[in-house]
Image: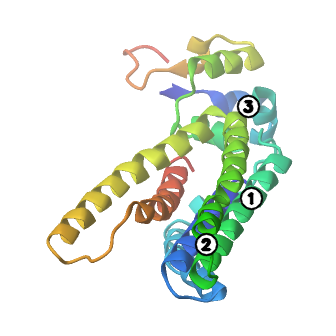
Amino acid sequence: MKNRLRVLRAERSWSQADLAKALGVSRQTVNAIETEKYDPSLPLAFKIGDVFGQTIEEIFQPNAAPRGEG
Amino acid sequence: MDWSVWVGIGLLGAAGFLYTRAELQWWAGVGLGLAPVLPVLLRLRTLAPAAVAEPLVVTECARIPERLQLRLMAAALLAASFLFMVTWLLKSVELASAGRLAVALLPIPAFALFIVAEVAVLLRMDELQKRIQLEALAIAFPAVAVLGITVEYLQKAGFVSQWTVGDVWPYMILLYLPAYVVSRWRYR
């Protein structure tokens, strides 16, 4: 699953540690999500949405997005 | 700490295994316990320095309090020391039947403490850390089953003389350790 976590974090000048602290997870987890090696659970995805003030769909997209999207 | 706690527990298990199954001094048991695991770690470090050096470092915001990790390590050390002590007592001291029974059951409270400490740490892990543990167990558990079945049939065929239920748990620890490192490496 693709995501805009790194971009959103960079826009706010947050470190991975800052975001991890806000989400209550380890920095390794944030890194694994950013590098798309790990897809977060739904509760964590909602929490990520809350932290950035966006919906899950605005942050996460399926790997094979339909043409014309994204 | 984090990863080093689990590696440390694995090393203790390996040392305990060797010590309890051979006529060795304690330092030889610890040394030989380290031997099979270090090459795996060193090899991984050579293959992917960042995989071992960077992501395995303590996270600034890990949810697992250090006191819980220290408690786990202390409980593992206590359990290992009981293991060494009981092995030594049963090998070296002449005891009556009741005494041998009491000595044989001595490690149970220490291992119960270890389980309590381990569960406390597991409950504080985030979802990725729990997945890493699960994957490590999912690799180690069938690997031990295959190993056990293989050795059992080798024993039946007369190629292995001794294989008891006591030989299973050390291999769980020995195989869990590289499985944990590999699983952790996947999410580097």
Residue B97 visible to an observer of this rendering: yes
* For residue B165, side relative to residue B103 (left or right): left
Q: Is B33 in front, or is B6?
A: B33
Q: Do the residues at pointers 1 and 2 share their chain?
A: yes
Question: Given the current orientation, which residue lies at the most extreme right position?
Answer: B67
Q: Which residue is mark 1?
A: B73
Q: Quadrant of the N terminus of chain B?
A: bottom right
Task: Name the subunit of mark 1.
Answer: B
Q: Residue at x 41, y 14 (%)?
A: A68
Q: Are marks 1 and 2 in contact (CB under 8 Å)?
A: no
Distance from Cα at disc 1 to Cα at disc 3 = 35 Å
Compared to residue B188, the image places residue A25 above or below, namely above
Residue B180 image point, x, y percent: 52, 54
* For residue B148, side relative to residue B24 (left or right): left
Q: Is B150 in front, or is B102?
A: B102
Q: Which residue is mark 2?
A: B96
Task: Name the subunit of mark 3.
Answer: A
Considering the numbered disc 2 on the image, is that residue within a helix, a strand or a loop? loop
Q: Earlier in the sequence, mark 1 or mark 2?
A: 1
Q: Do the residues at pointers 3 and 2 share their chain?
A: no
Q: Are marks 3 and 2 in contact (CB under 8 Å)?
A: no
Residue B170 image point, x, y percent: 48, 64
Mark 1 or 2: in front is 2
Residue B32 image point, x, y percent: 54, 83
Disc assigned to residue A9: 3
Task: Name the subunit of mark 2.
Answer: B
Q: Residue at x 60, y 88 (%)?
A: B28
